[in-house]
Image (tube, rainbow, N blue to C red):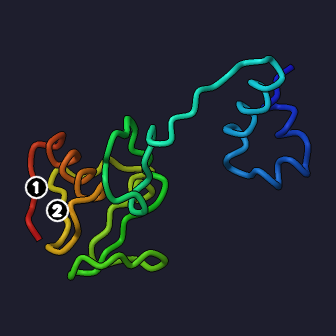
Amino acid sequence: MNVSLAMKKDPEADKAFGWVLEMYAYAVASALHGVGNILYKEFMIQPPWDTTIGKAYIIHYTYGCDYDLQGKLTYGKIGEWRFDKRSYDNIWPPRNLTLPPPGVPESVSVRMQHSAVELSGSYILP
């Protein structure tokens, strides 16, 4: 049985789970087949809400990181400085990414941006 397709074809399930249906389908399929999972609380972090890396293995870019020029999070509105994966749906990120403004804590958002800068080979200071 293809759980993902079964859930997608079910209008109620499709509406309830929306774009994350595949993730829930994996959980349902695992349970149906007796696949166990070991959950690690610190396995993944999600900026901007998780501000430190800690022991995390994965950074999940779920949310956009929007800040004003004083380094204050402006979630819910586009900030004067922003990094959001959705900005690059159809284009590559620019080689000259702008670093976060002073005041943004040494957080995942900052680490994420520094990693992107390291990969691109160049940066522009704000």
| Amino acid found under the numbered disc labelled 2 | Leu
Q: Callout 1: helix, strand or loop?
A: strand
Residue 119 in the image, given as x and y percentages of width and height: 18, 40
Q: Is residue 69 left or right of residue 91?
A: left
The residue carrying pointer 1 sits among few (fewer than 14), some (14 to 19) or many (20 or more) residues within 10 Å by Cα, namely: some
Q: Amino acid at mark 1?
A: Tyr
Label 1, on which residue? 123
Label 2 residue SS: loop
Sooner in the amino-acid sequence: mark 2 or mark 1:
2
97 vs 15, left or right, is left
Which residue corresponds to the image point at 17% horizontal and 72% vertical from the top-left?
101
Q: Residue at x 57, y 33 (%)?
A: 39
Who's the residue at 73% across and 43% down the image?
A: 21
**Quadrant location of the C terminus in the rendered image:** bottom left
Residue that badge 2 annotates: 99
C-alpha span from label 2 to label 1: 7 Å
Name the disc covering residue 30, or none: none
